[in-house]
Image (cartoon, grey):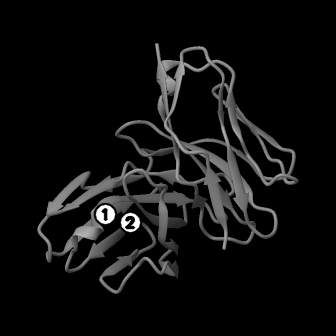
Amino acid sequence: GDSVTQMEGPVTLSEEAFLTINCTYTATGYPSLFWYVQYPGEGLQLLLKATKADDKGSNKGFEATYRKETTSFHLEKGSVQVSDSAVYFCALLKAAGNKLTFGGGTRVLVKP
Amino acid sequence: DTGVSQNPRHKITKRGQNVTFRCDPISEHNRLYWYRQTLGQGPEFLTYFQNEAQLEKSRLLSDRFSAERPKGSFSTLEIQRTEQGDSAMYLCASSLTGGDDGYTFGSGTRLTVV
């Protein structure tokens, strides 16, 4: 079945550090890929998406590129802020699918 | 639009009691999804509706769980004879058909079974 694997956290960084969260997927066909963010006490918010190979999704300084050859969608940000502390979820949606499949989440803690 | 609304935010119940949660999706969205999230895990799919039709149910959705979306607008998720293992965050989301633009999630209902 479809699955998403993320690097385990927590990831602890200092402010202005570079952030990478690895995400790989297993799915047949050509899924769409998403990153969601969950701030403490809140629901999931869509951060960015990519719908086909080599697409780059970007938002709020975060970027991720859909790499079909490595079945990956790693999330990056060049300079994190304390306000980026949250749990980040990678997810896939198959072209003919009806539900998002999520990874286990990666907690990020940014210290001042 | 106020987004996806879920009520209640928190529910504490005794084992064996029945509970019901409500979700009000974004009005233009014809799809509505229920997910369950336990501590430290990603959301797990439970079921989804397109308009009023329930089109898919996960194996996680035992016969103690039932979901409805009677008029294709709001949805309810009922858990009968709750067990401690049902303690989790129950998330509702909505989307337009296909979901390629992503889902909009509510803030969830946290259920604690004591």
Q: Residues within 10 Å of mark 2 (few under 14, many from 20)?
A: many
Dot 2: what SS? loop
Check disc 1 and report the residue beneath it: B22
Q: Quadrant of the C terminus of chain B?
A: bottom left
Q: Which residue position holds label 2?
A: B74
Q: Position of residue B81 (x, y in %)?
A: 19, 80
Subunit bearing disc 2: B
Q: Is residue A32 left or right of residue B89?
A: right
Query: Disc 1 on helix, strand or loop?
Result: strand
Q: Position of residue B8 (x, y in %)?
A: 24, 55
Query: Left or right of B9: which side holds A57?
Result: right
Q: Earlier in the sequence, mark 1 or mark 2?
A: 1
User: Measuring 55% from the left and 66% from the top, which residue is drawn there?
Assistant: B30
Amino acid type of disc 1?
Arg
| Residue B16 on image: x %, y % | 14, 77
| Residue drawn at x 86%, y 51% as measured from the top left | A53
Q: Nearer the viewer, mark 1 or mark 2?
A: 1
Residue A103 in view of the camera: yes
